[in-house]
Image (cartoon, rainbow, N blue to C red):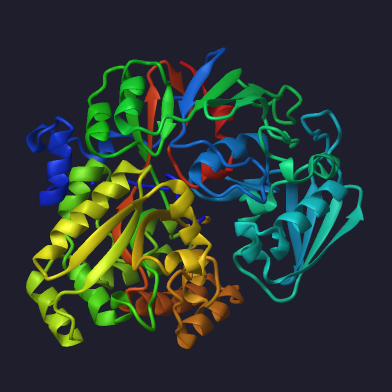
Amino acid sequence: MSHPLRRRRPAGPVAAVVGAVLVLASCGRAHDDRPTTAPQDHPAAAPAATERVESVTWNLPGEPASLDPTKVFSGADLWVSSNVCESLLAFTPDGSVEPGLATSISTPDPTTYVVHLRPGVSFSDGHPLTAEDVAFSLKRVTDPASGAYWSQFAARLEKVTVTDARTVTITLKQPDTIFTGMLATPMGQIVRKAAVEKAGTAFGSARGGIVCTGPYTVESWKKGDSITLAANDRWWGAGRRPLLARQVKFTFIADDSTVASALANGDVDGTFSVPGGAALFKLMNTAGGKMYLGPSTAQTAVVPTRLTGTGPLANPLVREALSYSIDYPGIISTIFGPTAKPLRAIVPPGAFGYASATFQQAYDALPEPRRDIATAQRLLAQAGTPHPAITIAVPSGSADLVRVGEAIQSNSKQAGFDITIKSMPDADFYPLFSSADARAKVDAFITDWFADIPDPLELYQQIGTPGSAADFGRYDNPKVAALLDQARSTPDAEQRAQLVVQAQQAITRDKVWIPIAYGLGTMFLNNRLGGVTSASPYSLYSPWLTTLGGR
């Protein structure tokens, strides 16, 4: 999506950054001990699974807040919910879209989508999937009143009607080029209407349960401890894809060193979004399992909270100076290992799902981010603030992002910055994504983020359109907003890409966000298992457990 992964994260080259090296040294691994394995030695997918396994343990970086499609948001939510609830369409590992609960979607005109439902599909409680359930689910998750992150992508939706027992018609107010792709995300996930009405606001929680059509069902949810899924033999796809992993227990170990030890000794079989720093380097040298690196749409960035008005980062010269004070290769090498590299624009190359040559050419034309203290000092002098005091928030639950913040704090002192790193628990940090009042208390925050679909427009429209979900700094550039709005209605892929590239140039120049790293999707998997891929957004939105098994 475009939201926190580790609660959204990626993972990089070689150089030293003073602050981060000290953090690593304190973890007991010296710089010279880091593996030099190149990313190409780590494939995206594990070998195919061929054997049934009765039980698998998989770790999440935190406990899901909910499995309800209107409430899922972070990686922890999505890695579980994607196996319980299915969408009308589904992603493949290469980022393309294939049929899901819809066998096909026809578009007789640019604003009409006729959804043809798959026959023979049942919910986990045995009731058949109906067109009424589909219409109810779409209206529910896309209703702005639901407060769902996904409702922003339905701004152009006018109505959803049941055409017949197996057909639903969606009518848009105007053409929307990202709408189809979003039907492969939780925006297109289908729930049973009667179950939602019975459970009310508890639907999707440990107390209220959840009823969907996915290949796995929730067997138990022990708050604060684990969620256990069981294979759903009612699943419509079981006949062509036997569910080899019969039971999967999700644990919520947050401490990086504890996660690394559990994976290394086999107590935990696998995880996505592998912790960085010492934990990453330990796992890359673990004999009992393997690190897999796949395509991703994710990045790590510094997000200013005020782009206009008062506050040091409201001055674009100060934002630019901050960008020149950062040792990008050092941060990446020390924290992310060989799984990331500096990022030139907010949207990384992994999201170039169409017109890739056009997007890549524009991306390559942007300057490589670099540390230049003299330029940073000159910009601060020009801004009239040679020693700006800045408060940057980081989530205390993500050791990687805390390390990134500490490194930026150390890096920037030489340029003249006086940065305070405010480490915040999740309960205080995550309101930064939804509350202007919360953001007013800090000048910026550091987060991992990802595009929901492989389309730069999807993320840029959230950042560049005033009032959109990721407009955290209240960016107000009418030209950019107009370009993105036009692109969203432009069916020709090349023409659309040219419009998005123009918007990208302005957003990058204005330092709306300061990109730090572009990382691959990471996964560690015990050698006894196979079939899973680290590719994202596939692992977030598609039922990835259906390919997991023994080998």
- Measured as percent of width and height from the top left, residue 364 is found at 28, 67
Which of the pair 461/69 is nearer the observer? 69
Residue at horizontal 69 percent and vertical 39 percent from the top = 204
Above or below, 382 relative to 183? below
Number of numbered discs visible in the structure rendering: 0
Residue at horizontal 40 percent and vertical 70 percent from the top = 305
Above or below, 199 relative to 242? below
Above or below, 501 relative to 98? below
- Left or right side of 537 for 519: left
- Left or right side of 202 for 430: left
Which of the pair 446/534 is nearer the observer? 446
* Quadrant in the rendering for residue 129: top right
- Left or right side of 456 for 123: right
Which of the pair 171/360 is nearer the observer? 171
Residue at horizontal 13 percent and vertical 47 percent from the top = 14
Residue at horizontal 33 percent and vertical 26 percent from the top = 258
- Measured as percent of width and height from the top left, residue 396 is found at 35, 45
- Measured as percent of width and height from the top left, residue 348 is found at 37, 59
- Measured as percent of width and height from the top left, residue 112 is found at 77, 67
* Quadrant in the rendering for residue 159: bottom right
Whether residue 151 appears in this view of the structure is yes
Whether residue 92 appears in this view of the structure is no
- Left or right side of 524 for 329: left
The residue at the far right in this view is 164
